Amino acid sequence: MLDYLARRILVMIPTLIAISVITFIIIQLPPGDYLSTLIAEMESQGEAVDPAKIEALRAQYGLDKPMWEQYLVWATGMLRGDFGYSFEYQLPVSDVVGDRVLMTIVLNFATILFIYVVSFPIGIYSATHQYSVGDYGLTFIGFLGLATPNFLLALILLYFANVWFGTSIGGLMDPSYIDQPWSFGKVMSVLEHLWVPVVVIGTAGTAAMIRRLRANLLDELQKQYVVTARAKGLPPFRALMKYPLRMAMNPFISDIGNMLPQVVSGSAVVSMVLSLPTTGPMLINALQSQDMYLAGSFLMFLAALTVFGMLLSDLALAWLDPRIRLGGGTAR
Amino acid sequence: MDRSTPLLRVHDLRIGFDLPEGRLVAVDGVSFQIRRGSTVALVGESGSGKSVVSQAIMGLLPRPAKILGGSILFADPEKPGTITDIVRLPVDGREMRNVRGGRISIIFQEPMTSLSPLHTVGNQIREALELHRDVSAHEATELTRDMLAMVGFPDPDRALKTYPFELSGGLRQRAMISMALVCRPALLIADEPTTALDVTIQAQILKLIKDLQSELNMAMLMITHDLGVVSNVAEEVVVMYRGRVMESGDVEDIFRRAQHPYLKALMGAVPRFDMAPGERLKPLREIKAETGHLLADRPKATTADNAPMLAVEGLTKAYTIRKGGWVSTSRKSIKALDDVSFTVQPGECLGLVGESGCGKTTLSKVIMRALTPDAGKVTFTDETGPTDVLALDGNRLTEFRQKLQFVFQDPFSSLNPRMTVFDIIAEPLVIHGIGDPAWRREMVSELMRLVGLDVRHLNRYPHSFSGGQRQRIGIARALALKPKMLICDEPVSALDVSIQAQVLNLLKDLKEKLGLTYLFISHNLAVVDYVADRIAVMCAGRIVELAPREALFRDPVHPYTQALLAAVPDPDLDNPLDFDAVMDGRASNPAAWSAPFTVDDSHMPGFVELGDGHFVRADPAILNLRLAS
């Protein structure tokens, strides 16, 4: 098991290096750099641009150096915890991102929790009561959630949250708490605001999860070992919990790796609509303005999250499923 | 209550399935009884309703099934004087749950799927104890370990912590048996407990069940389609056909004085070792192979220089298993084929027998060029001269495929469900660009008649045919290119006895009419005995004995062949299995074979001819041994 863990961590290193190279190339692909975007913007506003100043800036930011050197500076910097300098904000990337990362993690963790908590009981109910009124009704609501555009749902929920509970529009906390030190009131305010984006971001995932759990569990319920369990005299609910549900879990655990980055990047549009202080909207801005270190560090963050999520789900699978833990290598 | 009260009495049981097409009565007025400590066999082909009866006794009927009438009276010996009607108990009520698993247990056919792969064997067995007996955790572990020892686990302490997928099929079935018996039930229902196992393992499991039965004094309801198994374990027999009991009585009456035509027909359809030469099996419905003008009768095949049609020399194929460490990966090599050599003469049927995992399917795949061997040679010869099969490539390989075709084991997965029967049979012709559409249509019609299928069904899809009919479609497809030779890989192992006889007879007739040559692979010695001229016995990747059919059965030399022959249950009361001779899983271990036959690191015996084409893999010293005796 330790062997396996060590090997998996070693494999992550070349993966991350390859991702950083590809990320860097993709950011550089559009013609021009941040300065040329800036110049174009200034010229369109009729301001004169001093070529000498531009050159000085270019040298200062290292944009005149060859591509590979820029990459090396960026990549080695990341190892030291220095993620580069954001041109647009005129601040180190880590300072720009700072608080937003925490908020992003809080939001997405809550979303994943929401997805699991809601979809599991519904999925189990749908599978065990296949083709019943309840199954059809829940399936219908699930499809509705899957099909409704997130931003629309966001606007509707915001409206009702404001009308019914008096929650302030947008953001993850009441405006009075922004830039204030953390306090009990601030936490409560965050919780009060959190549920709208969680529901909005989570509905699609919940609906998909319900469908998948239902399908997986239906497959497992047909299996012979379920009959064996019942033939032992096990009451139906305990038999369900111990055997088929446990088997139906595997796809969900192997999904954690995909879900982490999906939830992070997928929430960008909703975050813009709700003007949440998360990383999503910032990434989109950074890409538009070719703020390359900011964008690059973001993409690396997502990639690292994927790789790490995969590791987590693999470890969890090996822990949960003895066939993976012990069967490795015996297959032909 | 006196001892004569039957343990279980099924009376006029009727069970229907509510399907969208209407109600199907699967069990129609079935009555029988089981005395305490006795063994009753419930015999029938698939679809006869025998498993539905067992599900009803366990209260485990699938959702669309409903009990329409009748009763199942269970007189529990632990509660003298009370008789429970299982039909009237709520299915998931406490009372029924106490009976289920506690007083009546069941073991299933598939040891692979009937245990949960995620829980240890110990956990799954203990669960039954904890449900039905008031025992402490420590006692439960003790009892579970005792039970595992009782069913023959060599190391019960380790077995407690193993997972089912770490065990062989035979051991899994033993685990399943110990789970069923750990609560000492009064009745054990065994639903085809050995059908999925190899013959030698089957004999061991049957012996185990019999021993345990007398030790625990329990009754058994054995559900099976195998008359050989019935004659060896049962005291009473109930024969079912289409949901009704056709005949019942004690085993002597049933086997010696069968009354009902269905039972007689079933007996006539089972291949036996003592069949007279040229005696045909009598299937319930015989099919006539009709040749036409495109597929005319052909004389026996000939080859250039009278060479064998297929010559296999020294085939070796190893699979590498990677065992992961992160610095070093250790590799272990398993030989699936080890120096396999044999020939098939034109017009002959060579039978290849062996247990699962012995390498017979790997061999057929190598000959068909689906796998590449590590060493060896395959030569195919017809009237035009020899072909080196392993050296063929591109167009020449495609062309060669017209000469050698394949019949698959599973008639369900080997036909594409989205193609009509016409498309399936015509596909080889299309691939090889033979004939125009009109000619193909005629050819396909002739092939359908050849395998006894109705030409009007050409536009149907495979799902509307039964297993036997599908297998015949598979045979027709294999014959479309007019091959010289067919490789049949377990062509009847998925079929019922009466259908099996039908297909075997068809294959025999086709061989005569079309002058075909067969390589016939099977795990069933009786089937091979019926169709083959010569038989090769394979074990652990090697051919251990090869002899003409009569010689092999009259004088089996190799210990593995002997064990294999001794383990086949014969549907003949005068020829019972010798349970004492059953080797405990050592029959297929080459290192455990006695002196001249031993195969291990220091002994690598080659093939020795004993005369008259009888070969055995042994040390040449065997010749002196035989002369001396």
Image (spheres, rainbow, N blue to C red):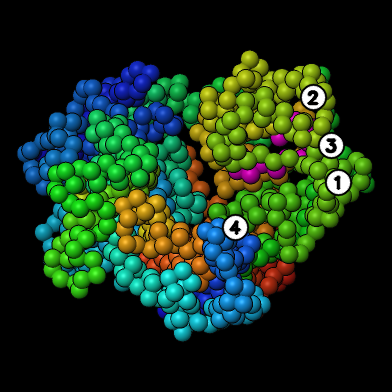
Range of residues picked out in magenta: B478-491
Tag 2 secondary structure:
loop
Asked if residue A86 shows in the view, the reply is yes
What amino acid is at disc 1? Arg
Q: Which residue matches tag 1?
A: B396
Q: Chain of mark 3?
A: B
Q: Residue furthest left?
A: B81
* Residue ID at (69%, 41%): B406
Q: Are marks 2 and 1 on the same chain?
A: yes
- Residue at numbered disc 4: B358
Residue B32 placed where, x, y %?
A: 26, 30
Sequence-first tag of 4 and 1: 4
- On screen, residue A115 versus residue B412, left or right, reads left
- For marks 3 and 4, the one nearer the N-term is 3
Question: On what subunit does the disc labeled 1 rest?
Answer: B
Q: Earlier in the sequence, mark 2 or mark 4?
A: 2
Task: List x then y, in percent, for residue A201.
Answer: 33, 51
SS for callout 3: loop
- Which image quadrant is residue B620 in? bottom right
- Name the residue carrying label 2: B295
State which quadrant residue B222 falls in.
Answer: top left
Q: Residue B524, image x and y in percent?
A: 56, 45
Three-letter amino acid code of the residue under disc 2: Leu
Q: Residues within 10 Å of mark 3 (few under 14, many from 20)?
A: some
Image check: B315 left or right of A204? right
Is there one chain holding both mark 3 and mark 2?
Answer: yes
Report helix, strand or loop for mark 4: loop
Residue A58: within the magenta? no
Chain for disc number 4: B
Task: Give the residue pinned by disc 3.
Answer: B301
